[in-house]
Every structure is written in structure tokens, then in C-alpha cells.
Image (spheres, helix red, strand yellow):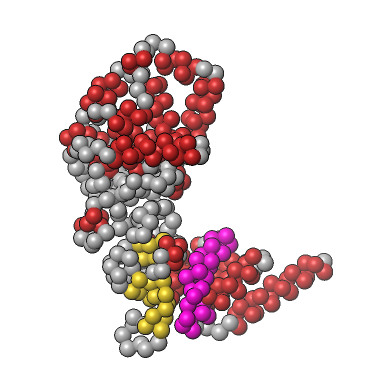
Amino acid sequence: MLPPRQQPRPGGLQTSLSLVVSPDACGSPNPQERGSTSDQARDSPSESASSRETWPTSDALMAKKLEKEKENGYAEHSVVRNMSNSDKISLRDIARERVDVIADRMRNLPDEYLEKFKYELRVILEGSGGAQHRNEFQFLQRLVNSRGELTDGILCLTHRTQLEILVAIKTGIQAFLHPSVSLSQASLIDIFLYKRCRNIACGSVLPAEECSCEICSKKNGFCNLCMCVICNKFDFEVNTCRWIGCDLCSHWTHTDCAISNGQIGTGPSVKVGASSAETLFRCHACSRTSELLGWVKDVFQHCAPSWDAEAFVRELDFVRRIFQRSEDARGRKLYWKCEELVEKLKGGVADPMACKVILSFFQGKPDILFIVLTSFYTICDWAVVDN
């Protein structure tokens, strides 16, 4: 059966960050709300960079506007001209000072000043300042992660902008600072406390599907529905061999992570009664193995007809790397077939033909189709040259 991550969702993957606003309330929200959470302390602000793929273009426009205003001296002057030094707050203050004290001070600040906080943190999370921004983010995150007093009850006292900043620092995801993201206070608190998936396009209550495996039971923000069990990151790739799903526990692993972590290799066939070796995937979550050739076959049969040439080359490359060190005959044949098709596609062979060839390979049909179609395109090329 096709792994869930390859199955098309109704209406496609929801990547818009314009979410339905939920009533602000403390405690655990309705399970149907969309939210997002974190796992471990981030090594760099860009670790969850894939979440930026969903940002509306208005974010870039807002950034340009703020930059222009700053250049003209307008934004800074208009915000702070009537404020004393005692009223000013920094990101470090928000990260380390008492929640109620900062919340009271933020309620007296103009909206422009609050937006200035969020823009400043977005710039840091973007990491465009290199080591300086990276070090500042790590410092802010250490401050937040060291605060054991930030419980449900305490976080209910936060100012809205204060809570968004705390969540963005803890998760390393800029999207929580975006004006188009309207998650409820309860959802943001659950995200901060690792009770809800930090992936806004997922938003599952954690542990997802009440999973009690060793990884999910750690309650560190991991979501088995959308995150890699090795790197704990998520992205919005679907219908692809970029992800490998475990047939037994339904946890997911990035193909690259599985390869680099030694989770793919040749071993005895998992099929009942089979004595030959085959290429297997060992799940990091449950340590059980599942065969990969049938999984790749399912993905290509369901998804390949919708891929363009660029996507086809990328998917063939994933499969090529999966079976690169395969020691079984079928795995080696698939590896060489992928190598051959990648070269043909780069040489201009049409992707519909490549799709037919790889599907014929999985069905065990002879390569005569590939030879005939390749000859046809070669003759067509000669005809064009002669004319």
C-alpha cells in the first residue's frame, strides 16, 4: 500500500499561513485547530528554513517597507520619540525577564514598536548576518530554554507579541512572527510546551496519533506525521522518494538522513518464503526492516506521471543513491536503469518516455520500449538537423 506521505491530501498540501483565527483561551485547544511546535534547541536559525517556503509574498514587501523607513529615519523616530529609556525593551529582555513584568510594559508600547521587535527577530532568524546573527539566536534560545517557570499558567499572562516572540525563539521558525499567521494563544502555548506540532501545515496534537514509541514519548516536540525521526526536521515535500516511510510503525525518515545514518543496506528478504537478499530500510524508530524496491515502485506508479523533467531527474537521483551500494541483482539493475535514464533526460529525452520506461522496468517488461523510443527521438533529431 502506498505510504501516507505519498497519498494526495484533499485539496493538496495546505501551505498557506493564513489560518483560521481561534478564540484566545488558555489550556489545550480543540484538536482541530492548526498549530506548530519545536523539539530540541536549534543549532542555527535556518534549521527549519523549509517553513519559509509557505510565506506569503507580503512578508517581503513589509521587510522592504521597514528597511526603507529605517533608512529615512522615520520608523525609529516615530516609534521612540515619546518614549523614555525606562520604557524601552530588547529581545534579550523578552527572553530572560519575568513574563508579567514584560507583558505590562509591552501593553504600553505603540504597535509600531512591537512590529519592530518582530522584524528584528525575523532578520536574526534569517541568518543573513552570518555568525553574528547565529550567535545572537543561540544566546536568545539558551535564555528561553533555561526558564523552567514558563508553564501554562505563566504563559497565559503574556502579551500576544511577547508570546509570538518566545515561540519563534524556541522553535527557530520565523513564520510565527508573520502577520498572516493567526494562531490562538492556546495553540501558541501548546507549541511552546511541545504539546502541538510546530509545523503549521500539520498542527497535530502531540504525541501524534497517541504514539507511545521511544522517540514520541520523549515529548520533545517530535511529530511522527511530518518530521524525520533522525534529524527531527520537517518540510513540505510530498509525492516523492525524498522521504521513506516505515511499513510497520508509519514513522518517516529523510532519504538522505537514512543513507548517511546507515539505515539502508542489503539483507535477507523480509518476504515470507523468500531466500534471496534485497535492499532494506531499517527504521530508526522501531528498528524493524522493510524492503525498498517495492516502496519505490509504488511511489513511481502513483506519482511519476505528474512529475516534470526536473522532478523526474531529482527522483531518479534519490533512487540511484538509495540503491547505489545495493548487493542484490534487482537493486543493481534499478541503480543502473536510473543512471541511464538520468543521462537520457539530461540529453533531451522527453520525460513522458522516461516515465514509461521506468514503469515498464518495474513491471518486468523488456527494454525494447526504451530502445524503440530512443531511436524514434534520435531519428526526429536527425530530421530537424537535415532540414
Of residue 3 and residue 142, the one placed in the foreground of this image is: 142
- Find residue 293 and report its horizontal and vertical position in percent: 43, 76
Q: Quadrant of residue 254?
A: bottom left
Q: Is residue 175 left or right of residue 158?
A: right
Residue 114 in the image: above or below residue 172: above
Q: Residue at x 44, y 56 (%)?
A: 237
Magenta span = 308-334
Residue 368 in the image: above or below residue 338: below
Q: Residue at x 66, y 65 (%)?
A: 348
Q: Residue furthest right?
A: 386
**Quadrant (top left/top right/bottom left/bottom right) for the N terminus:** bottom left
Residue 332 in the image: above or below residue 300: below
Determine if residue 118 is in view.
yes
Q: Residue at x 38, y 53 (%)?
A: 233
- Find residue 90 and report its horizontal and vertical position in percent: 37, 25
Give the prevailing secondary structure in the magenta stretch: helix
Of residue 81 and residue 240, the one placed in the foreground of this image is: 81
The question of residue 325 being in magenta is answered with: yes
- Find residue 73 and report its horizontal and vertical position in percent: 52, 17
**Quadrant (top left/top right/bottom left/bottom right) for the C terminus:** bottom right
Determine if residue 125 is in view.
no
- Find residue 85 and report its horizontal and vertical position in percent: 36, 15
Q: Residue at x 54, y 70 (%)?
A: 355
Residue 350 in the image: above or below residue 19: below
